[in-house]
Amino acid sequence: MMDFVAGSIAGCAGQLVGHPLDSIKVRLQSQSLVKGSTTNSLSAYQCAKLIYNEGGFRGFFRGLSLPLASKSLEQCVAFGIQSNVNGILDTRMNFAEGTVRTGLSGAIAGATTALLLTPVYLVKVQLQVVPKHGIGSLAGPIAAIKHTINRRGLAGLYTGALPLFLGTSIGYAFRFATYEKATNQMETLGFGRVGSVVVGGGLAGMATWASHYPLDLVGSRMEASVALTNRPKVSMTAHFYEIYAQSGIKGFFVGLGPCLLRAFPVNAAIFMTYDLCKEKLN
């Protein structure tokens, strides 16, 4: 139970730290869907200026309310499931301690969060890429949900579920395995617990995104396309072909820079908060 509670608090801390850079990442990933858009040729800094011009400083936090709650739930599930599965693999299946066991339990945790939270991710992405006012605008989470159901029915809330499921499973396997290896190495080198957790958590976050970024990009495009275009639902494979046709291999890594920049402080905050909470709750 402590893992679930500590994970929930840690998720809130991470979302507050990382939402502005996440908004830049999602905008860079999806703006080629907008007719006449030139965002693919813009830098992350120029994209940030665009968001600021549209909504000021608050524009970077558009769509925060739902992911703030969902991030709390996501990390609650992720840390809780990972810890419990790791324990089962240890005590009931005699799975040897190490990176493989940690990665496997992380993959199961990631798959579970994806199954639970795909609709939340879809709403977050739509609010990050669609203006709050004007033609085709979305006023908030309820408007995004209604728009999605009107366009694609209830099943539309799971648009992008396959790349999200695959990507989150892979990403969380790398996340927890990297965290374990990095913190152990840092402590061996003489770093204190706080420094080891901060650096290990930051590196774990970067490994998470680097391991599955193209899948995340495709998932974001699939989710954004519900609000940004009038075309019928397009498959994950079709999006891969479309990205390659538009931009080649480099198109699969649009927005990776701000994503990795965001990943280090966000996950450092998450793991540090989680570690402190577990210490206080023990």
Image (spheres, grey):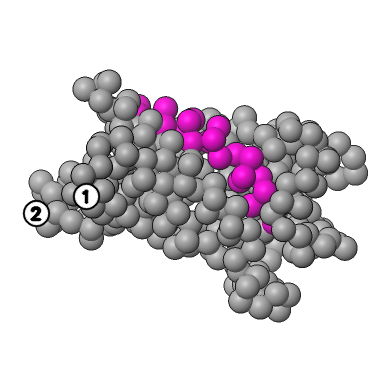
**Looking at this view, is 220 or 58 the one in front?**
58
Q: Quadrant of the C terminus?
A: top left
Compared with 178, 126 (above or below) is: above
Q: Pointer 1: what residue?
A: 189
On the image, the x and y values in percent for residue 54 come to 83, 40
Check residue 178 for magenta coloring. no
On the image, the x and y values in percent for residue 165 come to 47, 56
Q: Single out the residue that lies furthest toward the right.
A: 135
Q: Single out the residue that lies furthest toward the front.
A: 190
Q: Secondary structure at mark 2?
A: loop
In terms of image quadrants, where is residue 187? top left
Q: CA distance from mark 2 to mark 1?
A: 30 Å
Q: Quadrant of the N terminus?
A: top left
Q: Residues within 10 Å of mark 2 (few under 14, many from 20)?
A: few
Look at the image and give the residue range highlighted in magenta. 4-28
Q: Looking at the image, which residue is at 26% across and 48% down?
A: 186
On the image, the x and y values in percent for residue 85 come to 24, 46
What is the number of callouts on the image? 2
The amino acid marked with disc number 1 is Leu
